[in-house]
Image (spheres, rainbow, N blue to C red):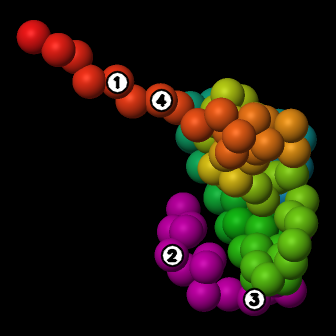
Amino acid sequence: MVKASVLRKKNEEQLNKDLEEFRKNLAELKFNKASASQQMKVSKLRTVRKDIARVLTVLNTMKKDEAREKYAKAKYQPLDLRAKKTRKIRRKMTRHQRRATTLKERKRAENFPQRTFAVMQ
């Protein structure tokens, strides 16, 4: 079993080599019929599959981190790098958009300001 912390220290070439090695190992386990016991084979299959998944996860996170660095200062980001949040929040108007008024609304507000009334008692 390989730890993810060890995999993160390796570079992409080494990870790809490890991945190929694990896949070969998996193929051997699947087609090796002269195994000592079925239980041992099943447990090894599971660990090898988990190792492959771990390597792929580390590779994908490395690629995503590189992409984040690349698009950090960019005006637009790819969809998979943007914050997920909720659909409602993503479509919410900005403060500037909410406060924007048309020319007609501005003129009306200027010419007819809100009146204040004093209540007599």
Q: Looking at the picture, tell me which residue is in the foreground, 32 or 48.
A: 48
The answer to the question of whether label 1 and label 4 lie on touching residues, with beta carbons closer than 8 A, is yes
Q: Looking at the picture, tell me which residue is in the foreground, 87 or 42.
A: 87
Residue identified by numbered label 2: 5
Magenta span: predominant SS is: helix
Query: In the image, residue 100 lies at what x, y percent?
Result: 75, 47
Cα separation between marks 1 and 4: 6 Å
Q: State left or right for residue 39 relative to residue 93.
A: left
Query: In the image, residue 65 lies at what x, y percent?
Result: 72, 74
Does dot 2 land on a helix, a strand or a loop? helix
The answer to the question of whether label 4 and label 3 lie on touching residues, with beta carbons closer than 8 A, is no
**Reading the chain from its start, which is encountered first: label 4 or label 2?**
2
Q: Residues within 10 Å of mark 2 (few under 14, many from 20)?
A: few
Query: In the image, residue 73 lies at what x, y percent?
Result: 79, 83
Residue 47 vs 5, above or below: the answer is above
**Reading the chain from its start, which is encountered first: label 2 or label 3?**
2
Residue identified by numbered label 4: 115
Cα separation between marks 4 and 3: 70 Å
Residue sitting at 70 percent across and 59 percent down?
Answer: 57
Residue sitting at 39 percent across and 30 percent down?
Answer: 116
Residue sitting at 76 percent across and 79 percent down?
Answer: 72
Quarter of the rendering containing residue 68:
bottom right
Residue sitting at 86 percent across and 64 percent down?
Answer: 77
Residue stretch in magenta = 1-21
The answer to the question of whether label 1 and label 3 lie on touching residues, with beta carbons closer than 8 A, is no
Inspect the magenta stretch and tell me whether residue 17 lies in it.
yes
Quarter of the rendering containing residue 22:
bottom right
Q: State left or right for residue 1 relative to residue 90.
A: left
The residue most toward the top is 121
Q: Residues within 10 Å of mark 3 (few under 14, many from 20)?
A: few
Specify the amino acid type for callout 2: Ser
